[in-house]
Amino acid sequence: MRAPSSRLHSLLAFAITLFSTTVRADEWPQWLGPKRDGVWREDGVVEKFPPGGAKVLWRKSIGSGYAGPAVVGDRLFVTDRILKSGSRNPTNGFARSALPGNERVLCLNEATGDIIWQHEYDCEYGIAYPAGPRTTPVVAGGRVYTLGAMGDLYCLDATSGKPVWSHNFVKEYGADPQQWGFSAHPLLDGDRLICLVGGDGSVVVAFHKDTGKELWRNLSSAGAGYSPPVIYNVGATRQLIIWHMEAVCGLDPESGKTYWEVAFPVKNALTVPMARYHDGKLLVTSFYNGALMLKLATDRPSAEVVWGGNHDGERPEKTKTLNSIMPTPILKDGYIYGVCSYGQLRCLKADTGERIWETMEATRAKKDGRMNPTSPKPIEGPTEKSERWANAFIVPNGDRYFLFNDRGDLIIANLSPAGYQEIDRTHVIEPDNPMPGRLVVWSHPAFAHRKMFVRNDHEIVCVSLAK
């Protein structure tokens, strides 16, 4: 009896060792994850949520803000805002008046949510939707880089929180904070921290990551906009894509030299989603102006228009392609998946912009927090029960998708040209920001260590997504 038992123990030990070495774990060190593409590549993730919903590991109180968290090692980094005594946020998000308060950079224990350190600085707001900072921290090489809503760029020591260097874009570059403040997530590329700044000739600026010294600056525009800078390999050329309110541009990331520029004037500088590149095509999408698809040449740095969205307006009955307000769409296998102006999750053909289907199910709340799988039919006219600015962040994981909507629901779904099929959903966090005229949570989650980390204006929550 001993020999079989011993052999069984050996086999079990081997299986455990094999599983532990093949299951992939990832961090979330910046906007849209390790590769800045919004793909969650971890294994060992739930197929469906357990009875009662995803298990909450911890909840901790923090201040308000739209900035998503970054997770590296055993630490989580997030920014928030604390109002001065006697001040309060407006209920109308478009109100712009002097609003005293402080911005903070928080370092939390990833396993418990306890605060390890915080860096706080005075920051009076004068922008619309003044709940707090917008950009996700960038964490690398023992440093944390953060950008506040009024243009305060900090490099902090990740261990202690002590400042290494800093800049203020308004004071140093004469940059306009714009209506919704500084919202473009910084990009770290080698020794360069690349930021949308603004000002004459300095729409985009590269700083040395260790010293903060300016390395180069380029581009002028009436507004820098809000779209995060991103780098793609196009043929043999690395191209830094900058989308400001007047044009989409391709730059050399090392020197800042302009490779190409395609005019695309955008109303209210609403260049919010990040540009997406796949299989020779580059997509941008704006709330008012619709989408623009460019073809990037692979033999030399150049771009040409493949198709453009309509300019008839953002109402559901007027939009033809994709008029996104916030979420960055997905390009996969010749199709586009993204959320339009009034909450319509749409599938389009990448070659033409033709709509294949749309549904409101991903951005609607469900009374019981769950729903059965469905496959919607195409909708040709106005979408019933549509809602302005309703949205959901879309994160691929393997062959399915995790969607976090602004009602606080996390959804597992299949997206394909055949339609939207919801597998399961769980309610994670309460929407609590009233500025759009309804309660929302407009913060992109982080997915790391088989967990999801997400915040609203009162707390940050960690839920387990491990099998």
Image (cartoon, helix red, strand yellow):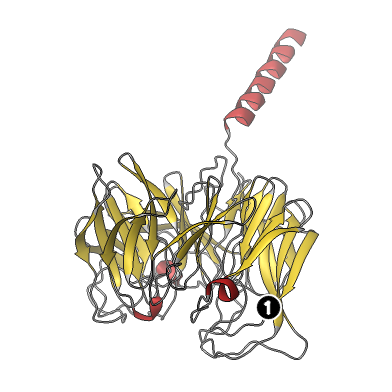
Residue 149 visible within the image: no
Residue type at mark 1: give it.
Cys
Q: Quadrant where the N terminus lies?
A: top right
Residue at the disc numbered 1: 123
Please state which of residues 70 and 19 is positioned toward the viewer in this rendering. 70
Which quadrant of the view contains residue 87? bottom right
Q: Which x, y percent locates residue 101?
A: 71, 81
Residue 273 visible in the current orientation: yes
User: As drawn, is 113 to the left or to the right of 373?
Assistant: right
The front one of 46 and 59 is 59
Relative side of 417 to 142, left or right: left
The vertical placement of 83 against 155, above or below, is below
Percent x, y for residue 10? 69, 16
Bin the neighbour count of mark 1 within 10 Å (Cα to Cα): few under 14, some 14-19, many 20 and up: many
Mark 1 residue element: loop
Q: Position of residue 178 (x, y in %)?
A: 49, 79
- Residue 309 location, quadrant: bottom left
Q: Choose top left, top right, bottom left or bottom right for residue 147.
A: bottom right
Residue located at (39% from left, 65% from top): 219
